[in-house]
Amino acid sequence: MAEINREDVAHLARLAHIDMSSEELDRMAGELAVIVDSIKSVSEVAGDDVPATSHPIPLSNVYRDDVVGETLSNEEALAGAPDNADGRFRVPAILDGE
Amino acid sequence: MTAVHDEVLSFDEAMEKYDPALGFEVHVELNTRTKMFSSAPNGFGDTPNTNITPVDLGLPGVLPVVNRVAVESSIKIGLALGCKIAERSHFARKNYFYPDTPKNFQTSQYDEPIAYDGAIDIELADGTVFTVEIERAHMEEDAGKLTHMGGATGRIQGAEFSLVDYNRAGVPLVEIVTKPILGAGRRAPELAKAYVAAIREIVKNLGVSDARMERGNVRCDANVSLMPKGSTTLGTRTETKNVNSLRSVEHAVTYEIQRHAAVLDSGAAIVQETRHWHEDTRSTTAGRPKSDADDYRYFPEPDLVPVVTNDAWIEKLRSELPEPPAERRKRLQADWGYSDAEFRDVVNAGVMSSIEDTVAAGVSPAVARKWWMGEISRRAKLADVEPAELGVTPELIVELNALIESGKINDKLSREVLDGVLAGEGTPAEVVEARGLAVVSDDGPLLEAIDGALAAQPDVADKIRGGKVQAVGAIVGGVMKATRGQADAGRVRELILQRLGVEG
């Protein structure tokens, strides 16, 4: 147990932009630790000869031809946006790119 | 932009004390018809937010599907870079919060890129060959375009809000990452420029990208670090983002080397951070330091299945590769009949492809070279851009040349015609008409100008009459001046001699 501590949860919450109270952090640390431990038990069963699996279905190479299909109109594209201006999505200025 | 100016050491002093290490991440936008994961058109300059589908907006319930041509283009890039092609690769989610992606993640590749372990030979201006090792080339999607509004500068500082156009979101990208490049010494800036030029040449030659840097088809992040001379331990690096012209790459690497040297000399440490390049001041400013935000929590993309290659597929794509650039250069030089020196100048000026296109459009190699190495290179130098970025098309040169050959304009006037065309005044023929630039071919006005010039210089006229035919130049000059260069100098000479009754 205790693979996940309170600081780990606080870090993840910050990355995911989720506000969590002190109580929530404590509770989640415990719950996540249980989940991590459960998943760890899979590693114990799977030996070196079992490749890591990212998909449960053994499928590969699903492609689309490079052919233009239907698109949204500008109005449709912006229909769900909280705010727009000049045919574009209007968002708060976020300091990052510059 | 901050008002703080960083200290820099002179480049020579920096090179006496330190060895630079470089690394590049070059993003190449593919020119597929549709996006990486949706069937929206991959276009440039269209009405904002029209080249999009629900997939590109990350609306709930959508499923991405991989573009086969984008995968094949990526494999071709890998092959052209001498990479191994992964038997099995998959996509991953790179999670971050920024409005340039509406999904809050970029679909990219992480631990299993499509291509890895390659190398390309980069030829420097004097013919020195430098091998750059390629770490990996992976597939991903481009982000939307933000425009910061409000505030004085259009930059994010002081901006009140941003407007987002998602037309570019989902455009297929291949990111090419080098291994650390050591041993370039004082040629590091030159190598940086040559490397990016080589990548641009390769992807253009493959036909998988339009490779227009001014449109952001090829974008470079340049990593620079310094080691004290004699050390073999890599120093702390900075990553200068979005250095998007060949000249900027060269200048940014030079600047960062000088800045790092000054910081290290002062006894301080380099902060690992991104730097922003400012073309206007030719300097960088600090961006975001490495932080929590760089924990992208990559995980395998559950909505996309792995890309699995086989020998037959790879060999088929390999067989479709065009002639490699080095061989192409050899062939073009032979075809055009340029001397080694002439050809090297053409390559160094970055106009080989332009000349090739211009010759294909129908002028002789000599004429194409005259234009690209002469007038166009001169203008590019003045404007501090690459010749190919001036907007001169092969068709334009064909038209200008046809006007010269037909005697309608001369070389001197053709430059003025070019001015007009580049200023958006229409086709060369239209500019000639509108600006009244045609060569004066009617002898009437010429004779008038000749009489004027003879009267102005009677002593010269006497000399010519007396048999000193070489003195005619002074009169020709006077006539050309009077006609503002719009006369055919050869014809003027003939007429002057006729007028004076002297045998040419």
Image (spheres, coloured by chain):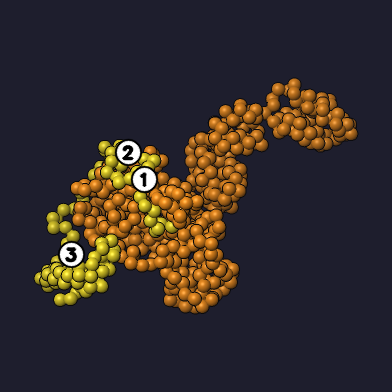
Chain colours: A yellow, B orange
Q: Is residue B298 above or below residue B381?
A: below
Camera sees residue B38: no
Mark 2 to mark 3: distance in Å? 42 Å
Q: Secondary structure at mark 2?
A: helix
Mark 1 chain = B
Mark 2 near mark 3, Cβ–Cβ under 8 Å? Answer: no
Q: Residue at x 32, y 38 (%)?
A: A74
The disc at residue B165 is 1
Q: Amino acid at mark 2?
A: Asn
Q: Is residue B82 above or below residue A1?
A: above
- Residue B234 position by quadrant: bottom left
Q: Residue at x 46, y 66 (%)?
A: B224
Q: Residue at x 42, y 61 (%)?
A: B24
Badge 2: residue crowd in 10 Å (few <14, some 14–19, many ≥20) = some
Which residue is nearer to you in this view: B50 or B92?
Answer: B50
- Residue B167 position by quadrant: top left
Q: Which residue is mark 3?
A: A52
Mark 3 chain = A
The disc at residue A74 is 2
Mark 2 chain = A
Along the horizontal axis of the image, is A84 left or right of B451? Answer: left
